[in-house]
Amino acid sequence: MTAVPDEVSADEVEVVEYTDPLCPWSWGAEPVLRGLRAALAGRVRWRRVYCVLFDDHDDDPAPDPAAETAWYARYVEDISGHTHAPRAANLRRVAASSWPSSLVAKAAEAQGDDVADRVLRRLRETVFVVGEPADTADLALSAVRGVPGLDLARLAVDAASDAVRDRVRADHAEARRPVAEVLSVRAGSPHPGAAKETPDGGHRYALPTVLVRSAGGVRAVPGWRSYGEYARAVGELAPGVSVAPVAPLDPAAALARYRSLTEPERELLTRGPWPPSEAVRVETGNGPLWLHPEEAVTHPATRRGTPAAP
């Protein structure tokens, strides 16, 4: 998932995912985007751009943090009503900054796509399962401890480096140069994804937004969308690339592959009796999260006392 030049070669297809580890709509889009990544694996170049949704300098401190947290918890609850994604039963606070989690997620890319995917997933789950957003360097690194294949010491060094901070700064800037077609969007989705105004009078991509890029042009799929809408965008620019969904996995195999599954994900990505006998159930404010037993040993939800049951 490394950065690529602005120009796309004649035989290359790039999928750019504008996201943030702490964004509730991006969390809700995980089932479909997990399925799309699986379908396109090895066929396209997938690149994540971290928008930095909670920027260090966007807002003054809230005069009443408890009231702000209560409002934001209701906002997340409303979104989860549309996406059916888990939400924390007790949100401790609104994230102070997306920079720490974005730096850790970006640094993890140097350790391979599987590790990067699992690191990002853990960071998302800090806010939407545990209720304590990974908004400091210590919390972000603690959240990803025990991710299979992760060199945590290397990650800590890389996340603090100037090189990774420069890459996230570049992501931050790129996310604030949206293509014209997302400046005004009409769709039936509860989150159609029109670009958001920024404090300096510009715009940034709504999250998530996916761009499909090839030598033939660019297609944007903003907001919370169906698998078919993503597939159509890929098909328009890369007619030779298969966008058929991958066959659903046996539940135990899916849990071993993905390590954690929400109810929408297991319905989309698995077929067969659920849950697998070894699955660990973690309760949230909107349905369970299912963990592989090895994942449960180091997952922040189980480490921090979130209720779990076999």
Image (spheres, grey):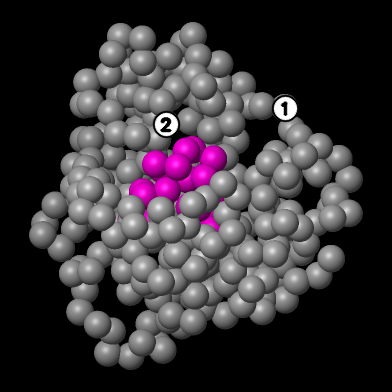
Question: Could you tell me what secondary structure mostly forms the magenta stretch?
Answer: helix
Q: Position of residue 86 (x, y in %)?
A: 62, 63
| Magenta highlight range | 103-122
Read off the residue under disc 1: 247
Crowd class of label 1 (few under 14; some 14 to 19; many from 20; radius 10 Å):
few
- Residue occupying image coordinates x 47% and y 45%: 116
Q: Is residue 222 visible?
A: no
Task: Give the alpha-carbon distance from disc 1 to disc 2, as whole Å.
Answer: 21 Å
Q: Is residue 130 magenta-colored?
A: no
Residue at the left extreme of this rendering: 200
Q: Position of residue 69 (x, y in %)?
A: 43, 81
Read off the residue under disc 2: 46
Q: Earlier in the sequence, mark 1 or mark 2?
A: 2
Task: Kindly identify the amino acid type of the residue bearing the numbered disc 2.
Answer: Trp
Question: Of discs 1 and 2, which sits in the foreground?
Answer: 2
Q: Is residue 310 above or below residue 214?
A: below
* Front residue (pair 284, 308): 308
Quadrant hosting residue 257: top right
